[in-house]
Amino acid sequence: MNIRRWPNLIIIAVLMTLAACQTSADQPTPTTAPTAASAEIQATTPANGETAPTPLPDTNGVAEVVSSPTPSPVADTPTPEPTATPEPSPTPSGPITYTFRVLTSYPHDANAWTQGLVIDNGTLFEGTGDWGHSSLREVALETGAVLRSLPLSDEYYGEGITVLGDRIYQLTWQNNVGFVYDRNTFDLLQTFEYPTEGWGITDDGQRLIVSDGTSNIYFWDPDTLTEIGRLQVHDNNGPVIRLNELEYINGEIWANIWLEDKIARISPETGDVLGWIDMSNLLDRSNLEQPADVLNGIAYDEATGRLYVTGKYWPALFEIEVIPTS
C-alpha cells in the first residue's frame, strides 16, 4: 500500500462520514400515523364533555365506533287521558221475594165476592161484585158484621173501591161506568164513564190509580176523572198481567194478581215489580163449609201501619206481617 495515499484516504473517509450524517439529519423522524378509527374518535368526541362512544374491535383488529344518532327535537306530546272502562251491565235479577206471618184473623162474610178493600180513618169499607150481588159496604173489622150496605143495580158488576178525601170511588167490570159517593152517607154524587174494563182502584192522595186486568196502570185526575198518565207493569220476565185489586202503601202500588196467590209490589214511577209476596196457603181450605175463591182484597191502615188481606167468598180476613224470604 502506498502510505502517502493514507491521508487522502482518511480525508475521503471523513468526508463520506460527514455526508452520511448530513443525509440522516435531513430525513424526518418517523411517527405512528393515526388510524382511521383514531381520527373518527377525535372527530366525534363531544365538545360538551359527555363521554365519547366506546370503540368496538372489528374482525380486522381495527377499532370501530358505534354511536347513536343524536335524536332530533320532538314536540311535546300531551299524555292521553285514560279511557274509562265501562262498567259491565248487570244481569237483570228477579224482584225481592217475601212471605208472610199471620198476626190476627177476623170473621169475614163468606158471601162477599170481595173486589175492593179499604181502611180509612179506622173505618173498613168493602166493595163486592157478581151480577145481582154487587154492593158498597161499611164493615166492622173485629166481627165482620156489615154495618151498612148500598146495593148496585143488577145491571152492574161491582169492582174496586178507594176513598180519597170525603169521596168513595167505585168501578164496575164491563159496564165502563164508575160511581162517586159521599164517604159519610153513601149518597151517589156522580156517575162517570171510562174506556177500559174496571178492576182495581186506589190513590196516592192526589191521583186515582186504576187497573183493567192487563199489565197497565192508569192515573186519573180525581176531579175530572180523566186519564193523566199510565205505565206498564213488568218484572225481569216481562209484562205482568191480570193486575186486580190495588192498594197504595208507603210509596208503592200493591196489586193482587188474579188467579194467583201472590201480591206484586210495584214502583209507581217505572212500573217495575219491586217485590213478590207469596201468599200461598194463607187460607186453610180443608174445613171450609163452602168453596172459597181467589185471594183478592188489600187494606192498609196508615194510622197503625197494619195490613189486612182477604179473598172472594173467604170466611176470614187476616192481619199479616210481610217478611223477606232471605
Image (spheres, grey):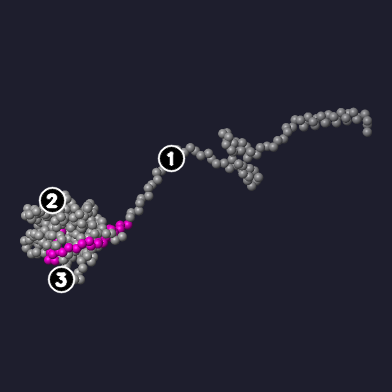
Q: CA distance from mark 2 to mark 1?
A: 70 Å
Q: First in sequence, mark 2 or 3: give its number.
A: 2
Q: How many marks?
A: 3
Q: Which residue is mark 3?
A: 289
Q: Residue at x 57, y 33 (%)?
A: 47
Q: First in sequence, mark 2 or 1: give its number.
A: 1
Q: Tag 1, which secondary structure?
A: loop
Which segment did they paint magenta? 91-117
Dividing the picture into quadrants, the one containing residue 244 is bottom left
Judged by depth in the image, the label closer to the viewer, 2 or 1, is 2
- Check the picture and name the quadrant holding the N terminus: top right
* Numbered tag placed on residue 107 in the rendering: none
Q: Residue at x 14, y 66 (%)?
A: 110
Q: Is residue 123 magenta?
A: no
* Numbered tag placed on residue 77 in the rendering: 1
- What type is the residue that disc 1 sits on? Thr
Q: First in sequence, mark 3 or 1: give its number.
A: 1
Q: Tag 2, which secondary structure?
A: loop
Circle 3 packing at 10 Å, graded few (<14), some (14-19), many (20+), is: few
Q: Tag 3, which secondary structure?
A: loop
Taking depth in this image into account, of 16 and 27 the one nearest to the observer is: 27
